[in-house]
Image (cartoon, helix red, strand yellow):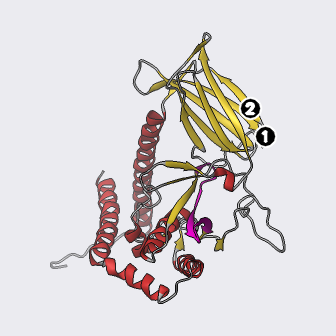
Amino acid sequence: MKNIVLISIVFFSIITLIILRSALYVLLFSENDLTVLVENFKGNETDEYKIANTLMIWVNENMKPMYKPPFICPLQPLSYFYRTTDAKIIFLVKCGACGEQSILFSEMAKIAGLESRIANNPGENHAWNEVKIGGNWIQLDTGARIINDTGYYERISSANVTGMNKNISYVYTENSDGKIIDITEKYTKTGKLVVVVKESGMALENVSIRLKSMADNKTYKSPLDAATCTTNSTGICEFNIGGNYYTIVTEKNSIIPLIVYRDENVTKLEEGEETIVFANPNKLAASTELILALEIIYLFLVVHFSMKMGSLIGDKLRKLIGSKHPQKRLSFGAD
């Protein structure tokens, strides 16, 4: 028991020190640092394309990618579980994945006098930027270091060109007042998926629909939902999305908290076509919130028992070493 307590104290002390170090950096950080950096890059340049390109290169070369080992940011020990959306902190730690890079670029573009927005592609777990140049929204990806190449994401890499070989499902952005704007058709050819939810012939309203993008008819491309919707008064949800395999998760609340009625269907949507899927959520299942709570409890138990096993192994090793190398006792007194 003492060993478990000791290990716990050491572990949480290290985490606390790292968090305090992060807090100290944030307190010492001056907002002028980012502004001065951007203004130095911009100088007297007025060409929007050149300014955007310069900022993109800086982000690409100075941000440590979080999608490589050890998969966390040194100054953000909880970055694997919690992703900050504060551009100042991202600039401070200079570490993150595509989401953090997009946030930082948007802030830098704003300082430089450019309009920028983030293109979110949750189904394929990616994000990039769009920057307004010459009155038009132009694609810009700091991680890939490309501008105005909307075909990059679905293109297959070859000796002459690079690509990500993805089937884009859904891409959206937000305007300044938070309104969602669908920009999927800029990046892929779309089809129309219609989900009809009925029970005993009656349309079900306010039923949650979640689409999961799939690499094939068995494997999810991302743990994130590609798109979500709530059925209208006629029990219908419509999606204009890229051609792909999708798992359609339909959930209706039950009278029991954290328990829902669920239905899952796998379908393939062809580009340029319309597919209608009928769903009937009639199987009891745990809600997403309950599953998350159980995962947290499971993680806690794994950590707890790992520490306990480590303590037991440590005790065994100490006894084994002690039996082979007994300590000599010193005696003081007359022989």
Sort mark 1 into few (<14), some (14-19) or many (20+) by Cα contacts within 10 Å: some
Pointers 1 and 2 in contact (CB under 8 A)? Answer: yes
Q: Is residue 25 magenta?
A: no
Q: Could you tell me the amino acid type at mark 1?
A: Glu
Residue 96 seen in the figure: no
Q: Name the spot of residue 323 as percent of width and height, x first.
A: 42, 63
Whether residue 250 is situated above or below residue 310 in the rendered picture: above
N-term mark: 1 or 2: 1
Magenta region, residue range: 122-140
What amino acid is found at the position of numbered circle 2 in the picture?
Thr
**Pointer 2: residues within 10 angstroms few (<14), some, or many (20+)?**
some
Q: Give how far across and how far down residue 60 sits, in percent.
A: 57, 76
- x, y (%) of residue 300? 40, 46
From the viewer's perspective, tell me whether residue 215 is left or right of residue 200.
Answer: right
Q: Which numbered tag is attached to residue 270?
A: 1
**Badge number at residue 275:** 2
Examine the image and state in which quarter residue 328 appears: bottom left
Residue 156 placed where, x, y %? 80, 62
Q: Residue at x 48, y 86 (%)?
A: 41
Label 1: which secondary element: loop
